[in-house]
Amino acid sequence: MPALTSPGLPRPDFTALSEMTLAVTLARAIDQIDEGRWIADDTIGYVRTGSGNEIDLGPVWIPSEAGPMTTTPIESTWIDSGWRAEARRIEAKYGRGILATKSVLELDLPVRAVPAPMVASLLG
């Protein structure tokens, strides 16, 4: 990466890059099952918790064979540890979700920590 090899360039904000990548990947996946949603700006759920914190990708309604259902809420943060504090926002609001991390994989809790590249691969 240029920031690592060129002095003076700022380090990229990997949390923001991860969030943007997951948002585009999710929007494309939703548009594939319900064409026209991307153009209508109806693929990304913007959510704030009662305390004003943001959840990056809130649930949106999508069609399914079993009837309408919501997508899983996703929060993106580029961390290797301390992820439970981040996961509590999703857990408090929805009871379940995905925390897209740098490298943490923990699937035994209602809010699962999954590396962001893996989340993007599963969505795509």
Image (cartoon, rainbow, N blue to C red):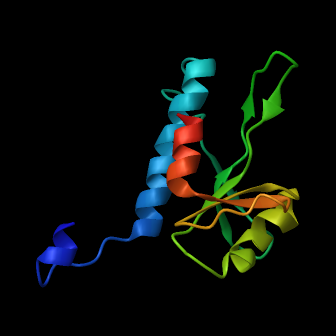
Relative side of 18 to 98, left or right: left
Does 9 sit above or below residue 45? Answer: below
Residue found at x 31% / y 71%: 12
Residue found at x 20% / y 74%: 3
Does 34 sit above or below residue 5? Answer: above
Q: Is residue 92 visible?
A: yes
Residue 77 rendering spot, x and y as whole percentages: 56, 68
Task: Please identify the quadrant where the N terminus is shown.
Answer: bottom left
Residue 25 rendering spot, x and y as whole percentages: 50, 39
Relative side of 93 to 45, left or right: right
Residue closest to the eye, 18 or 54: 18
Image quarter for residue 71? top right
Mark count: 0
Residue closest to the eye, 88 or 79: 79
Residue closest to the eye, 68 or 72: 72
Relative side of 103 to 95, left or right: left
Residue found at x 52% / y 41%: 121
Residue 38 rendering spot, x and y as whole percentages: 51, 29
Residue found at x 45% / y 53%: 20
Q: Is residue 37 visible?
A: no
Relative side of 65 to 4, left or right: right
Image quarter for residue 104? bottom right
Residue 51 rendering spot, x and y as whole percentages: 77, 76
